[in-house]
Image: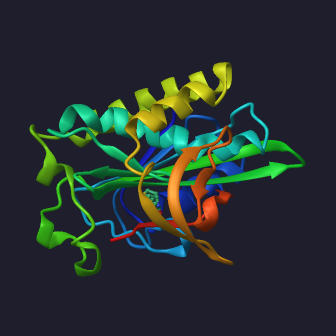
Amino acid sequence: RKIISCREMQSTQDHAKKLAIQGGSEGTIVVAETQSAGRGRMGRSWASPPGGLYFSVILRPGITLAGAAGLPLVAAVALARAIQPYTAVAPGLKWPNDVLIQKRKAAGILVEMSAEMDRLDWVVIGIGVNVAAASVQLPPEIRRTSTSLAIESTRIVHRAQLLGDILYELEEALDMFQTQGFEPLRKQWKEKSHTLGKHVTVVGSRQSIEGKAVDIDGSGALVMECAGGIRQRVTSGDLFFKG
Ligand code: BTN
């Protein structure tokens, strides 16, 4: 597979997307030591100081656009599995795809894709892991809610090894997703959930929904039980725990 590695890049995600549009092959990986314009979900930026792991990978999975809704959760399961051996406490998942350690975010995933009709052309999965950062090196605005492997780890983390571990788990999870569908991954996601059973607010672009997170449905959507016992399916947004 092709690996493009740079000391500094604006965003591995943007670079990988450019390559994907130009026909870059499945499995192409773009990795950088630091990013000057790292991007997060919902139009946010992603702080990318040196010492972290920042990479994006091009995929051309044989699934439909509708099926692709499960991809962020599939990636989160893989990432949690890869990180687990490094941490004293098993990582937990926050819907849709944040990996938490001790309730704080240690890694984020950004999934972007392009489709023609219902056929996926390319998918780029971007992963950022806070590896080396000490608490004071995290940006002040996320210090209380973020952590890093260095803070939580029981052993020294070699980033090349961690990258290999994540790619291995990602390949396993994607294989399973393409051969067996979302169900086994949904089960794994639920086992690692730090979301279900909790009172949450999901802030979407058009509305906010408050209630209890009760399930993940067959497409990766969050099922919430709201006032009056009404069930709502949420397909996107930013989740906050209440209280
Ligand atoms: C999030 O939690 O909001 C997602 C964060 C994704 C960050 C990664 S770092 C590598 C890749 N390049 C980017 O610009 N973003 C992703």
Q: Residue furthest right?
A: 117
Q: Position of residue 187 (x, y in %)?
A: 51, 30
Q: How many marks?
A: 0
**224 or 158: nearer the viewer:** 224
Rendered-image quarter of ligand 1? bottom left
Residue name at image x 32 percent, y 71 percent: 243
Say how the picture is coloured: rainbow
Q: Position of residue 111 (x, y in %)?
A: 58, 52
**63 or 144: nearer the viewer:** 144
Q: Position of residue 67 (x, y in %)?
A: 73, 39
**164 or 235: nearer the viewer:** 235
Left or right: residue 67 compared with residue 1: right
Residue name at image x 48 percent, y 68 percent: 39
Residue name at image x 38 percent, y 35 percent: 166
The answer to whether 175 is drawn above or below residue 141 in the figure is: above
User: Residue 219 occupies which quadrant of the picture?
Assistant: top right
Residue name at image x 48 percent, y 74 percent: 44
Left or right: residue 71 compared with residue 78: right
**229 or 17: nearer the viewer:** 229
User: Residue 28 occupies which quadrant of the picture?
Assistant: top right
The answer to whether 98 is drawn above or below residue 1 in the figure is: below
Q: Position of residue 73 (x, y in %)?
A: 53, 43
Q: Residue furthest front?
A: 228
